[in-house]
Image (tube, rainbow, N blue to C red):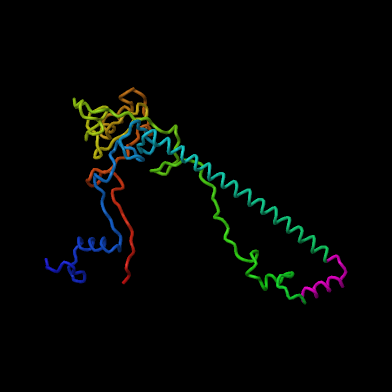
């Protein structure tokens, strides 16, 4: 490979590493980076607090939350929706009052027009002549021809921003789908039996195992939650054992396809493990 200086950017040899380095230092271009294991939460951590769950619950889309955190989120969203609804109703009532005032003003204008037309022709001609002789630019329709920009009523007004009607459904912070409290599934993790009673469960690297096969669970192992019992099992166990009889091995309840919820997991540091593992930041681009 041809050798060149460290800061050579116009030569025929300009490596990918140098291009990424120059883009990150200059601030131009789009910077991409693949997230590793240290940048993504563990599979048993809450999607809101990013800490191991004390009372884990699962959404129908497979996102894990701590029960306390998701309840606080739902209550906060309901309060915000109620505030937005009050603002929307207040704005709607104000618009209706303004429409009533405009209708009344229009009726009064029509009445005045009818009164003028019902007068004698000579009186109407005299009134028009008086308006024509007037030097005021606010008489009759001359205000449209010669507006006075220093009069507040003639200046353009910037009204308050319009409030749109909010969606009354609480959305999941991860998937964006409607979230109801009764749809949350209580998750029961099976603790690992490693005979280590001195080390706290949170500080252990391997904390939980499959409820059926006793395989250690982690970010690199696809898992699923069985809705009737809330037990966590591996997807391999689901495909090879559970789907043959479609029975919950913990309590023997009949299973349906929607009762097997795949757990959304984080990254393991390797390719094809987890989802949304790439961070992207768009920057300004210099055009040639």
- Residue 126 is covered by the magenta coloring: yes
List x then y, in percent, for residue 231: 32, 28
| Res 147 quadrant in image | bottom right
Please tell me how many numbered marks the rendered image carries: 0
Is 211 rendered above or below residue 121?
above
- Residue 243 is covered by the magenta coloring: no
- For the residue pair 73 and 241, the one nearer the viewer reads as 73
Q: Residue at x 70, y 73 (%)?
A: 137
Is residue 203 shown left or right of residue 120? left
Check the image and name the residue furthest to the bottom: 133
Q: Main secondary structure of the magenta part?
A: helix
In which quadrant of the rendered image does the C terminus lie? Answer: bottom left
Is residue 243 shown left or right of residue 135? left
Q: Residue at x 43, y 39 (%)?
A: 73
List x then y, in percent, for residue 42: 28, 39
| Res 265 quadrant in image | top left
- For the residue pair 200 and 44, the one nearer the viewer reads as 200
List x then y, in percent, for residue 145: 67, 73
Is residue 262 shown left or right of residue 38? right
Q: Which residues are magenta?
A: 117-132
In which quadrant of the rendered image does the N terminus lie? Answer: bottom left
Q: Residue at x 76, y 75 (%)?
A: 134
- For the residue pair 160 and 279, the one nearer the viewer reads as 160
List x then y, in percent, for residue 160: 56, 55
């Amino acid at each position: 490979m041809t050798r060149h200086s460290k800061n050579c950017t116009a030569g025929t040899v300009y490596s990918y590493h140098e291009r990424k380095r120059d883009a990150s230092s200059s601030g131009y271009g789009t910077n991409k980076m693949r997230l590793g294991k240290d940048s993504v939460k563990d599979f048993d951590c809450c999607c809101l607090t990013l800490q191991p769950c004390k009372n884990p619950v699962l959404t129908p889309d497979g996102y894990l939350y701590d029960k306390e955190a998701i309840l606080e989120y739902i209550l906060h969203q309901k309060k915000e929706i109620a505030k937005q609804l009050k603002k929307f109703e207040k704005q709607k009532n104000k618009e209706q009052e303004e429409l009533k005032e405009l209708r009344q003003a229009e009726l009064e204008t029509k009445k005045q027009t009818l009164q003028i037309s019902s007068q004698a022709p000579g009186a109407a001609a005299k009134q028009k002549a008086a308006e024509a002789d007037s030097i005021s630019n606010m008489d009759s329709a001359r205000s449209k021809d010669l507006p006075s920009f220093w009069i507040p009523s003639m200046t353009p007004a910037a009204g308050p921003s319009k409030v749109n009607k909010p969606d009354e459904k609480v959305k999941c912070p991860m998937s964006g789908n409607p979230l109801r409290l009764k749809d949350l599934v209580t998750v029961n993790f099976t603790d690992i039996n490693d005979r280590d009673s001195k080390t706290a469960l949170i500080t252990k690297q391997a904390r939980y195992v499959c409820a059926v096969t006793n395989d250690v669970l982690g970010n690199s192992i696809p898992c699923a939650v069985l809705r009737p019992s809330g037990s966590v099992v591996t997807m391999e166990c689901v495909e090879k054992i559970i789907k043959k009889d479609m029975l919950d091995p913990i309590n023997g309840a009949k299973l349906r396809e929607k009762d097997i919820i795949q757990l959304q997991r984080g990254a393991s540091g390797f390719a094809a493990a987890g989802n949304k593992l790439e961070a992207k930041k768009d920057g300004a681009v210099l055009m040639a």
